[in-house]
Image (spheres, grey):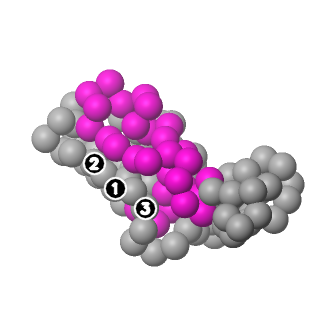
Amino acid sequence: MKPVGLRYLKNVTTLQLDQSKCIGCGVCEKVCPHGVFTLKDNQAQVVDGDACIECGGCALNCPAEALQVQAGVGCASAIIKGWLSGSEPNCDCSNDSNCC
């Protein structure tokens, strides 16, 4: 299930997939809330890296440790906090209230 229209910045995600470690279990595809992954020929593929919000769900659930992501960094963290609190995301770290 991929939400339509949700986007982060282009080509800045910390998500990394080591296909040599991938066992093709499909857990990443199941846990990703933004449809970043698909399985092709029993291997995970990143099909929409720019949709990644760096939540860390894929890396935390990958039994083969084939995924790495720096969860909670950058403006993705501020966006998640904004969604959860109903406030506007704030990536300005001069104000501690919603700092990334």
Secondary structure beneath label 1: strand
Residue 44 in picture, x, y percent from top left: 29, 44
Residue 38 in picture, x, y percent from top left: 36, 49
* Residue 46 numbered mark, or none: 1
Quadrant in the rendering for residue 76: bottom right
Residue 100 in the image: above or below residue 28: below
Instruction: Please report the residue visible at 83 percent of the width from the left and 49 percent of the height from the top.
Output: 85
* Residue 13 numbered mark, or none: 3
First to last magenta residue range: 49-77
Which class describes the residues within 10 Å of circle 2: few (<14), some (14-19), or many (20+)?
A: some
Q: Report, in whole angstroms, how far the alpha carbon at label 1 lies from the one at label 2.
A: 8 Å
Q: Amino acid at mark 2?
A: Leu
Which class describes the residues within 10 Å of circle 1: few (<14), some (14-19), or many (20+)?
A: some
Secondary structure beneath label 2: strand
Residue 69 in picture, x, y percent from top left: 40, 47
Q: Amino acid at mark 3?
A: Thr
